[in-house]
Image: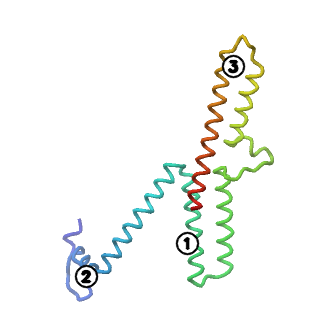
C-alpha cells in the first residue's frame, strides 16, 4: 500500500520503500542468513505445536519459562550484567519453574491436603472405590461385579499405559 510513497535514501535519491529491499540482498550471505533464520523459526513453531498438541498449553508455558531462563544464562555469560540483577532474575526463574511444576502436577505437595485433588490421587481413590464395590456386592448382583471388575482392569491398563508412555518419553529425552 506504500508503493506510491517516495522516501529519500542516503544518496538523497527518492525511491520506493520496496526498492530498498534489494540492497539487503546484494550481499549473498544475507540471503543464506534469512533462509537459516526462516528454517529456525519453522522448527521453533513446530516444536511449540507438538508441545501443545501432545501435552497442553500449560506445558508450553513451562517450556517457555525454561527457554527464557537459558537465554538469561547465555546473556549473563557473554555480557557483563550486574551480579544483583542476575541473582534477582535467577530467583524469579527458579520460583516460576517450581510453581509451574506444581501446577502441572510434576511435583505433588503432600501436606495440608494439597494432594487431595491431583490426578494421581483421584485415580487411586477411584480404584479403591471400585475394589470396595466389588467386596460389598452380593453374588446375586454378579453382572455389576463383573462390570466393575472390567472397569477396574481397564483403569489399571490405562494407568500402566500412561506410565509406559511417560517412561518412553523420559527415555527419549535422555537420549
Disc assigned to residue 46: none
The answer to whether the residue labelled 2 contacts the one labelled 1, judged by CB atoms less than 8 Å apart, is no
Q: Residues within 10 Å of mark 2 (few under 14, many from 20)?
A: few
Q: Which residue is mark 1?
A: 71
Q: Which mark is residue 26?
A: 2
Evaluate if marks 3 and 2 touch, with contact meaning CB atoms under 8 Å apart: no
Specify which label sits upstream in the sequence, 2 or 1.
2
Which residue bears the numbered disc 3? 145
Residue at (64, 33) in percent of width and height: 155
Q: Quadrant of residue 150?
A: top right
Left or right: 151 in relation to 9:
right
Residue 90 position within the rendered picture, expressed as x and y whole percent measured from the top left: 66, 71
Q: Quadrant of residue 71?
A: bottom right
Task: Say if 64 sits above or below 52 in the image.
Answer: below
Q: CA distance from mark 2 to mark 1?
A: 32 Å
Q: Position of residue 115 (x, y in %)?
A: 74, 45
Image position of 7 (left or right of 115)? left
Amino acid at each position: 500500500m506504500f508503493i506510491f510513497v517516495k522516501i529519500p535514501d542516503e544518496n538523497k535519491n527518492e525511491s520506493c520503500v520496496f526498492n530498498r529491499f534489494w540492497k539487503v540482498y546484494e550481499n549473498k550471505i544475507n540471503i543464506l542468513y534469512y533462509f537459516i533464520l526462516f528454517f529456525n523459526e519453522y522448527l521453533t513453531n513446530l516444536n511449540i505445536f507438538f508441545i501443545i498438541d501432545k501435552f497442553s498449553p500449560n506445558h508450553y508455558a513451562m517450556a517457555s519459562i525454561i527457554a527464557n531462563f537459558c537465554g538469561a544464562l547465555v546473556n549473563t555469560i557473554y555480557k557483563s550484567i550486574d551480579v544483583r540483577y542476575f541473582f534477582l532474575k535467577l530467583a524469579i526463574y527458579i520460583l516460576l519453574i517450581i510453581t509451574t511444576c506444581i501446577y502441572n502436577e510434576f511435583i505433588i505437595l503432600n501436606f495440608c491436603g494439597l494432594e487431595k485433588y491431583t490426578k494421581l490421587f483421584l485415580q487411586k481413590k477411584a480404584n479403591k472405590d471400585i475394589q470396595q464395590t466389588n467386596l460389598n456386592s452380593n453374588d446375586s448382583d454378579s453382572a455389576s461385579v463383573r462390570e466393575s471388575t472390567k472397569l477396574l482392569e481397564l483403569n489399571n491398563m490405562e494407568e500402566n499405559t500412561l506410565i509406559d508412555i511417560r517412561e518412553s518419553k523420559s527415555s527419549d529425552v535422555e537420549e
